[in-house]
Amino acid sequence: MANQANDRHWVGFDLGGTKMLAKVFDAEFNGLGQERTKTKGHEGAEAGLKRIARSIHKALEATQVAPSQLAGIGVGCPGPLDLKRGIIRSAPNLGWENVEIKDYLEKEFDCPVVILNDVDAGVYGEYRFGVAKNSRTAIGVFPGTGIGGGCVYDGSILRGKNSSCMEIGHVQVAPEGPLCGCGRRGCLEAVASRLVIASRAAAAAYRGQAPYLLARAGTDLSNIRSGALADSIANGDEAVEAIVREAARHIGRAVAGVVHLLGPDVVVLGGGLVEAMTELFLSEVTESAEQRVLPSFVDTFKVVAAKLGDDAGAMGAAAWVEHHVSAS
């Protein structure tokens, strides 16, 4: 285990449903190298843990950093987590349950390992190194297949006793609205996720209201990705633009509630949808939120687009384990 401060290295790991990323940092958090590979969650948790360890070893080898130089490993994970014991309780997109990832990696690398929610990792990355740097309180909203949320409050990730929180995707914004995957009605995810937007856009294309989208992607949801939606809007499909703007306004409604509760100075929007249609999301979310907050809150926060992209999760995970080790 690394003892000298200037010899300390950190690994940030982003465990996704389709890919995983291991990134090595020096003591000043300069990125030294990385290893990206497919997750292959269907092969099972045991095989998955071995792939994670192998990815970290390959990243270390590529950067000529020995495992003995590691001061800590941070892992951003999907699904409900037992943060204290370092267990992935359930990751439906991987098919894993009760995976003791912390113990496994600590035995493999002989250094502290901390796990955290993947969205929390992304928000913390933006707080330490990105658009939310130097803020007091930052919240993050990441619309995708679902809608994830996270908050850094006065330097620490806001979370419960043993689990993450900020489930903004399940804040009710449309009472008696569409059924959400969680079984409740009107959740933000049920009206503003990329999957919902794509479904509504496909219906518009089928009805002849989005001719460009129909010609480019058809009505198959697997083809209606963020880029296709952005191109559809750019090429005059007004029905698709209206669908996306409505979804963004719903996000603004949820953001307004969080602003009242936590008083953030920065609201970070991230993910593929936001990257593809940045100005649309920034303008609609800002306007929708400002219309709904108390007058005294209107000028207290700014809605901005994330800038770290795919590196945010790994950077945030590495920075969080450094924060954890330094505080212990």
Image (cartoon, rainbow, N blue to C red):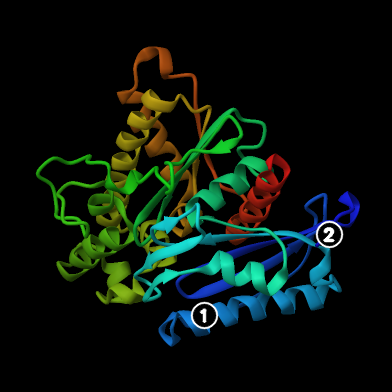
Q: SS for tag 2? A: loop
Q: Are marks 1 and 2 in contact (CB under 8 Å)?
A: no
Q: CA distance from mark 1 to mark 2?
A: 26 Å
Q: Which residue is mark 1?
A: 48
Q: Position of residue 8 (x, y in %)?
A: 83, 56
Q: Which residue is mark 2?
A: 2
Q: Position of residue 35 (x, y in %)?
A: 68, 75
Three-letter code, disc 2: Ala
97 left or right of 182 in image:
right
Q: Is residue 45 above or below residue 174?
A: below
Q: Position of residue 123 (x, y in %)?
A: 54, 46
Task: Residue at 90% x, 53% y: name it.
Answer: 4
Let me know if residue 119 appears in the view: yes
Task: Residue at 43% x, 42% y: name it.
Answer: 161
- The quadrant of the picture occupied by the C terminus is top right
245 left or right of 279 in image:
left
Task: Residue at 35% x, 46% y: name it.
Answer: 167
Q: Residues within 10 Å of mark 1 (few under 14, many from 20)?
A: many
Of badges 1 and 2, nearer the viewer stands 2
Front in this rendered view, residue 74 or 101: 101
Front in this rendered view, residue 245 or 66: 66
